[in-house]
Image (cartoon, rainbow, N blue to C red):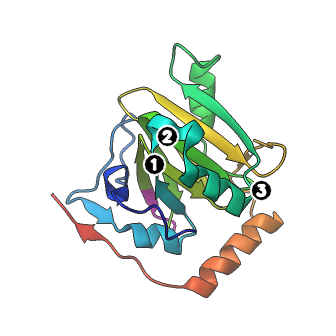
Amino acid sequence: MENEFQDGKREVIEAWYMDDSEEDQRLPHHREPKEFIPIEKLTELGVISWRLNSDNWENDEDLKRIREARGYSYVDICDVCPEKLPNYETKIKNFFEEHLHTDEEIRYCLEGSGYFDVRDQNEQWIRIAVKKGGMIVLPAGMYHRFTLDTGNYIKAVRLFVGDPVWTPYNRPHDHLPERKEYLDKLLKIGGGNQAVEGC
């Protein structure tokens, strides 16, 4: 299932190593020169992604297959923008605090775009840009954060196995079993950094 629905994925999901700038979190934060990361590197870190038909998501057979295969029984829609999200400023600040969950974080972008930041094996920040049609799964126990980009809008489907639990555990929470399990998987996979210079 993880290897299906990959056609055109790079048009909706792209990743790169981030700089250390304290500028607006909504900026791309590319290093100089830019260091793009192949999707395979994200897979090594446990991140799964697909490209789906977001224009017909409610009737999309591919999404149904993913949900059945992975047990995603719960679904809702979240609009993140100043006009539609109550307590917008507070929530955006909270989303950008580095944290983990004890379950997968699954997001499917229907409109707009945003950034999911994750760390590689060497604690370097990787920025994952997700656009309309991109679906991403961050594994339980992986530290991450989220921000909008300068478009200031994302409409995303949230999926969950069973009843949703959105509890964020801000770093450090290394004692949690899910964190230890995630690190164990990383050790088994191994692999070094694979950056590709771009322009």
Crowding at dot 3, Cα within 10 Å, few <14 / some 14-19 / many 20+, comes out as: some
Residue at figure coordinates x 37%, y 57% from the top left: 9
The mark closer to the camera, 1 or 3, is 1
- Residue 167 location, quadrant: top right
Nearer to us in this view, 57 or 98: 57
Q: Which residue is mark 3?
A: 102
The answer, for residue 107, to whether it is visible in the render is yes
Q: Position of residue 115 (x, y in %)?
A: 45, 44
Q: In the displayed structure, does residue 142 sit left or right of residue 43?
A: right
Residue at figure coordinates x 43%, y 82% from the top left: 192
For the stretch drawn in magenta, the main secondary structure is loop
Callout 2: SS: strand
Disc ID at residue 109 = 2
The magenta segment: 122-126
Q: Are marks 1 and 3 in contact (CB under 8 Å)?
A: no
Distance between the alpha carbons at the discs numbered 1 and 3: 23 Å
Q: Quadrant of the N terminus?
A: bottom right
- Residue 182 location, quadrant: bottom right
Q: Earlier in the sequence, mark 1 or mark 3?
A: 3
Q: Are marks 1 and 2 in contact (CB under 8 Å)?
A: yes
Q: Is residue 190 above or below residue 46?
A: below
Disc ID at residue 134 = 1
Residue furthest to the left in view is: 199
